[in-house]
Image (spheres, rainbow, N blue to C red):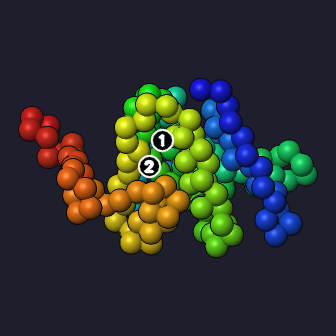
Amino acid sequence: MATKEWKQSINGQTFLISTARDLPHEFVQQAFDNPAMYWAKPISAANMKTLLDNSCTLGLYKLINGDERTPVGMARMITDYVTLAYLTDVYLADEYRSLGLGRWMIHCCREIVQEIPELRFMILLTGSEQAQQLYRRELGMKVMGTEETLAAMGARKAWIPGS
């Protein structure tokens, strides 16, 4: 997929969302270590490279002096770019919340999946009612299993027989 970029000014600050594969690994590690991302934890440098190389990752940056990028958020989609997109690891640094940046990041994810002509599902997992409301509104998502005939299922490694 070609790199996509979006730019927006909010309260006199300029922000950029980019799918370029240059989101600093240190930023992702810090996000994974943040209690707001309770499902994640820091991983080895080699695994971080593999994770980012095999994902469509949107980096959210504050632009300083026109082009100097400071990462402030991210959203990661695991996708084959044909039938499925799994949205995960949506993160925004505390000091940048309440500016509409999270909603904007989700809008950019929506734009990417709308370009997938044979998309069957965009899926995600969340335990947050607030996040569910956002994803319903911005992505048209439904809680599967209650509003659909499908059941959202998963297994942690420790639950898989033979692990």
Q: Is residue 109 left or right of residue 149?
A: right
Q: Which residue is mark 1?
A: 77
Residue at 59%, 61% (x, y): give it: 102
Relative to 111, say whether 4 is above or below. above
Q: Are the residues tagged 1 and 2 within 8 Å (C-beta)? A: yes
| Quadrant of image for the N terminus | top right
Identify the amino acid type marked 2. Answer: Thr
Residue at 40%, 57% (x, y): give it: 141
The quadrant holding residue 91 is: bottom right
Per the image, label 2 sits on a secondary structure element best described as: strand
Query: How many numbered badges does the structure rendering display?
Result: 2
Residue at 14%, 46% (x, y): give it: 159
Q: Nearer the viewer, residue 7 or 40?
A: 7
Q: Can residue 70 be seen? A: no
Q: Is residue 126 left or right of residue 154?
A: right
Q: Which residue is mark 2?
A: 88
Residue 158 location (% of width, % of height): 17, 45
Q: Nearer the viewer, residue 66 or 49?
A: 66
Q: Residues within 10 Å of mark 2 (few under 14, many from 20)?
A: some
